Image (cartoon, grey):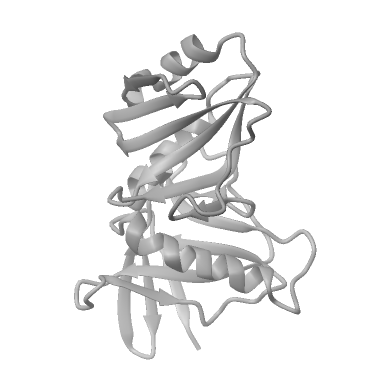
Amino acid sequence: MKKFILLITILIIFSCGNEKVLELPQIEHAKITDIKDVSHAYLFYDESKADSVELNRKNLISTTNWLINVDKRLTLKQAIPHIKYLQDKKANSSHKKEGVKNYFTCNDININNLGFIEFTDIAYFTDEKGYNHDLKTNHANIVFLNQNDIRIITSDNNVVQTKKTTLAKTIMELFELKETLLYLEFNDSLSFQDYITIKTLMSKLDLENIEISNHEIIFN
């Protein structure tokens, strides 16, 4: 029988005498801190393997909420293909249950406990195929090269450069009076910690006239 020990910043798993360590991404003031009826998958950072990533999904049950534990040191290039695989596996399961969701597990440093970010409806694209803007609405792409190099590309191809600390202000100035749909694009060299930090920031923007698309591009 497997034993799981959860610590504040790392997840240590003992299985058949082997110990594996997974460093959870950190967030602040998570909106979701308690989820019932769950099963787990783990994406480990593994320096011994050529691609430095290992997926353990043996304990997943399709009729439960899935908690996907991703090591914060992994890049999006390493993590996203496995995340997409898990999404597809659940979506195509003949035993899936209505209403169950998918979450990333994080360490909420404000409460010294776990926090969760839902990604059930996020569709990841690694290229432009199948990814189309809603041309009926005002839209913009927010391109995250890193946390200090962010570009906003408007529907009329205007490019505005900003950084994480000024992103909210820049968005408000650009789209204050416009109903706008924002598409997020992430450089695949970003760490999973960077991704979670940016996603948390975007989810907390108080922008009544702005919607964030569930279509996300991961580019290189």
Residue 3 position in % (x across, y down): 46, 79
**159 vs 109: above or below:** above
Quarter of the figure with residue 142: top left
**From where the camera sits, is residue 130 visible?**
yes
Q: How many marks?
A: 0
Q: Residue at x 72, y 61 (%)?
A: 100
Q: Position of residue 219 (x, y in %)?
A: 36, 49
Residue 44 position (above or below residue 144): below
Q: Is residue 124 above or below residue 64?
A: above
Question: Residue 194 lies in what quarter of the image?
Answer: top left
- Against 27, residue 156 (above or below) is above
Residue drawn at x 58%, y 47% is: 33
Q: Could you tell me which residue is drawn at 54 percent across and 50 percent down? A: 116
| Residue shown at 26% from the left, 72% from the top | 51
When asked about the image quadrant of residue 176, the answer is top right
Residue 16 position in % (x across, y down): 38, 90
Residue 162 placement (x, y as % from top left): 32, 21
Determine if residue 70 is in view: no
Extreme residue toward the right, this view:
98
Q: Nearer the viewer, residue 154 or 3?
A: 154
Is residue 157 left or right of 65 when viewed as pictured? left
